[in-house]
Image: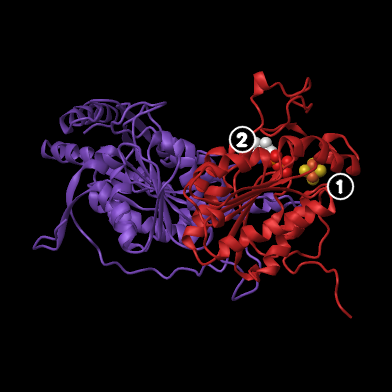
Amino acid sequence: MSVNETGKVFIKGNEAVAMAALEAGCKCYFGYPITPQSDIPEYLSRELVKRGGVFIQAESEIGAINMLLGASATGVRAMTSSSGPGISLKQEGISYMAGAELPGVIVDIMRAGPGLGGIDASQADYFQATRGGGHGGYRIIVLAPASVQEMYDLTMLAFDLSDQYRIPALVLADSAIGQMKESIVLNARKQISLPDKSWAVRGRAGDDQQNVVKSLYLGDGEMEAFHWKMHARYQTLSDYECRWEEVMTTDAKLIVTAFGSTSRIAKTAITMAREEGLKVGLMRPISLFPFPKKAYAQLSDHCKYFLDIELSTGQMIDDVRLSVARDAEVFFYGRPPGAGSLPTPEELLEQIKKFYQTVISHQGD
Amino acid sequence: MKTVFKRPDSLKNVQTHFCPGCHHGSVHRLVAEALDEHKIRSETIGVASVGCSVFLYGYFDVDVIESPHGRAPAVATGAKRARPDRIVFTYQGDGDLAAIGMSEIIHAANRGEDFTVIFVNNTTYGMTGGQMAPTTLPGQKTSTSPYGRDVKNDGAPFKMAELLAQLEGVAFTARVAVNNPKNVLQAKKMISTAFRYQVEKKGFSFIEVLASCPTNWGMQPLAANQRVSDEMIPYFPLGIYRNTANL
Ligand SMILES: Cc1ncc(C[n+]2csc(CCOP(=O)(O)OP(=O)(O)O)c2C)c(N)n1
Ligand code: SF4
């Protein structure tokens, strides 16, 4: 990797994730090989170890997530990464981490499924990521990069938010973003001030308090209290940590909404549509949990038509529908994951035009 | 006056929830004595498993991480690698370690992770009510082997101390029992050795303790102690199975 004269580096999305982890002070990485994310462990097996960090190729994704749990419990920053089948195996561990209020970063480079599926880009793990794929009722922070730059920036943010809120954070991308190469700026970023980790398990030397990292709550009312406490924390996340991008939404009659790789293609398509005089905009959620509900609600005050586009048969659309005003209509265009399912800008433009016609016929020009 | 008997500092002054005659309490005590002996209480991180020993943090006066069922060796790997200057031990039952957690234990041992495993083999799933475990003896009746464990159907019991002794990363494995004073003294020595090896950064150390579960065996405590000698030890012989100091 070389830095060019504009201070940029030309790297793959997956490499950007790995580099961001180093920059964020990640001390331990645990993973298991799976396409399309193997560049992350490959990079870290070289670079993390050089810096005195810990790299372990675990016996399975179950092993990896529990190593993350153990490392994170001692207060260090740690990360794992995987894709569909591996993320499924990690769900037990993620649930335990959520139950024990442990931070930790999990990177999910989505591939097609269910089952072994395929290695093509997919967004069909939106539900798994945002609904808490494990048991018990919990939420985790989910950030969805749409560029190599964001792979870098959002991985760093994932470490910060996860530490700040003591909630695991998942970076949700797909093979298109993971494998794509782009020029990015390696931000020398301002580190937010983080609460100290006095809860961490380090042996009692120093403070003599017994610290316990656990998710077992057997006392009368203890478990219920835990749920309400976390519910309030999720609410705080929703109030302060929603992130999204709007493009040409102010005068839009139709707002396309998509996340990750799909939003990139949609952005090109709405620019093409604008050139043809169609008033279309783009709403791209960056944080999928917390989902920017209020931003959608505000948009739907003036724009009543949305077109949700996903590489699935429709998952995020549930959140969009719950967020927009009751009188707003949400259309859908989906390409379930698989070989050749990544739509072209022209294909999306065609869909935009089709739905725009419907809008005009309802609303007039 | 000379103190001849006291509670180890590493154990809290509380009553345990263990059933009368259960050996978990004795094993807790021996582990606590080893922590006291090596003066490592304040730098120790215990990793609890899922089973009757899940309340490790309630009894040991050390920092504790609770792990999912079977995953304690992976959790301990993460903790020890992140904090190599700390003493880390897992405490696991036979269902936890030799069934659901077989992959985690074998790989941690094979990597030679520098922590100590206390493996309590009571030939049954205690906490869930006495179902068949991977260590249930041939012919032994449990709530899920009502006709007795049939080796043709269920396989033969795992001998973990021997199995792990095959792995190069392992520094020390031994099997002990705590059903009579002689065995307790031997167990104390072995558990102490296992922790000493960790203090000396020699690598993975593993102690299998043959233990009673009077409740799920349907026996009085004394009869359960006797069963350890009569039925378990003949199948699971006591002794050291690997000791890198002697290699
Ligand atoms: C994934 C999962 N499966 C099953 C259980 C239920 N469970 C709790 S303890 C236990 C077995 C405990 O037996 P053992 O490990 O032998 O320990 P003991 O209670 O005998 O000390 C099981 C199966 C669980 N907690 N998690
Ligand atoms: S059920 Fe068995 S292992 Fe569990 S506490 Fe009781 S006697 Fe001990």
Tell me, yes or no, whether dots 1 and 2 are on the same chain: yes
Label 1 with label 2: CB-CB less than 8 Å: no
Where, quadrant-wise, is the N terminus of chain B in this rendering? bottom right
Q: In the figure, the purple chain has which letter?
A: A
The one of A332 and B195 positioned closer to us in this rendering: B195
Measure how far apart labels 1 and 2 are at the Cα level.
Answer: 25 Å
| Residue type, mark 1 in image | Gly
Q: Position of residue A1 (x, y in %)?
A: 17, 55
**Label 1 CB less than 8 angstroms from ligand 2:** yes
Task: Identify the element where label 2 is drawn.
Answer: helix
Dividing the image into four quarters, tell me where ligand 1 lies. top right
Q: Residue furthest front?
A: B246
Q: Which mark is residue A14?
A: none
The one of B39 and A256 positioned closer to us in this rendering: B39
Q: Which mark is residue B21?
A: 1
One can see residue B67 in this view = yes
Q: In the figure, the red chain has which letter?
A: B
Residue carrying label 2:
B99
One can see residue A212 in this view = no
| Residue type, mark 2 in image | Ala
